Amino acid sequence: MRKVVACWHCVLQRDKCGPGDTCDRCLKRSQRPNAECGLGCSRVRLWELVSSFLPSIMTSMHENSQLTNFVALHIRQWSNVEVTLRLTCGQGLPYISCKVYEFAPKTQELLQQFQYTTDTRTGKCIRVQKSSPPLGMIQLNHKDEQRYDRYINDIVDNYLGPFAYACFAEEQNDFQRTLFLMMARLRPKADDEVKLLKEVFRLIVVTYIMGHTLTIQEETKEQSLRQLRSYIPGVYASFCSPRMTNRQLKYFFCRLHQTIMTNVLNKLQQIFKSSKGCDKWTSAFCAVLGLAMAHEDNQKTIHLVTQTKAASHEMSVQDAEAQSDATCEDIDGKFSFIMGIFRWKYNRGYNPLRDSEQDWMSKLKDPGAIQFAREVSILVRENILAADYLNRRQRIKICTANQTQYTSRLVAQFLLSFWLPS
């Protein structure tokens, strides 16, 4: 049993599990009328879901071999012109200082780049092709990963307010930004909960970085690019990004992305498997909510990656849509499983969101956590469009941005599950 581990139903009900594809207790449970078996007899460890949440369609391009082949395919030779760039992932956020070198391109691939923006009037995603300066790092030093890890920490420790506005800038409604800032104001008492909440924020930040282009800080752009032998005035527009450098930096952030996602899922599994009652509810809630925000951002990135491949004629439009849809559906399914575990552990006996006016001090044991739950409950109730939802199980919508089919969908699904019958 130590090798196969107990299934989640037996873990949550504190039952003795058994071996087999379906344990004896789950088999008997499935034969009872009206038995809820939504989790199935699953023994999956949550950290094993990383490969589904960060699929190869996103990560394969950032593997060392892929990056080496990409350089060999598109770069003829490097020059000795060294340029120091200040790159940032969003307005109001700190910059990364990066020493790069000019190269002579073998093809035109690295002299152009697709960037995506949202039309504020229509809410539609627009692809723009921009010129990209021929700059890249000659060598990737794995020790630099620590520097980029500190960059993520810097944003989490000092810039969560500006980050919230950058991260949710494209939304037509401030629902998710408000929710994020509520989490940012939360101050857990226990050290392990403080560490988990910080790791959740690190996950959201690194997911945002992986889904957005790192651009040259506008006030230093001209001064840096004038040093290039190939520099032509007026060629590089605002939000300029060296495509090669951007891809090399994503190599490091991709590795950090996988590590941080694994840490959050591993800690969440420990909370789910613990025998403690409601006192870890807030930490588990923030972890699942943070995963929902990260997954939504990943799903947008997956669609943009396949759209770019279709625009570059690497695959057909039909294949790109089919691949992105299938990948996103897999993420939906795995996240629904995690939500199901949360409901099994907490919703039947503890529901601080639905029953926010009750006295939760004896169970949550933290006035700050109680106030947080009440604020979230009010926010969700204020944004429910269907007034009769609490009386009928029906599909409803949250008043959030709708520029893509994935915006706030998983967040809404998780939050609204607290009002569904257990």
Image: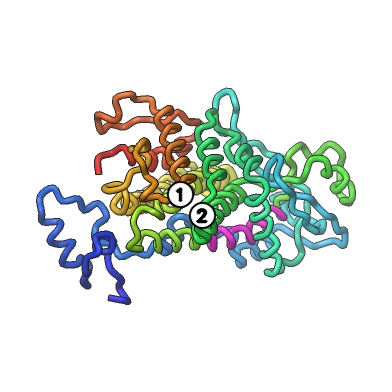
Say if mark 1 contacts mark 2, CB within 8 Å.
yes
Query: Does the rendering let one see residue 11?
Result: yes
Badge 2 is on which residue?
189
Q: CA distance from mark 1 to mark 2?
A: 8 Å
Query: Mark 2 packing: few (<14 Cα in 10 Å), some, or many (20+)?
Result: few
Front one among 360 and 91 = 360
In the picture shown, does residue 131 fall above or below 379? Answer: below
In terms of image quadrants, where is residue 165? top right
- Which percent across, then down, holds residue 303? 50, 44
- Which percent across, then down, holds residue 383? 43, 28
In the picture shown, does residue 68 fall above or below 408? Answer: below
- Which percent across, then down, holds residue 347? 30, 47
Q: Magenta residues, as a range?
A: 244-260
Q: Residue at x 78, y 50 (%)?
A: 86
Say what secondary structure mark 2 lies in: loop
Query: Mark 1 packing: few (<14 Cα in 10 Å), some, or many (20+)?
Result: some
Residue 61 drawn in magenta: no
Q: Residue at x 37, y 44 (%)?
A: 360
282 with respect to 191 (left or right): left
- Position of the N terminus, as image quadrant, is bottom left
Tell me the chief SS of the magenta region.
helix
Which color scheme did the rendering employ for the protein? Answer: rainbow
Front one among 16 and 238 = 16
Badge 1 is on which residue?
366
- Which percent across, then down, holds residue 94? 73, 48
Q: Amino acid at mark 1?
A: Asp
Say what secondary structure mark 1 lies in: loop
Query: Does the rendering let one see residue 327?
Result: no
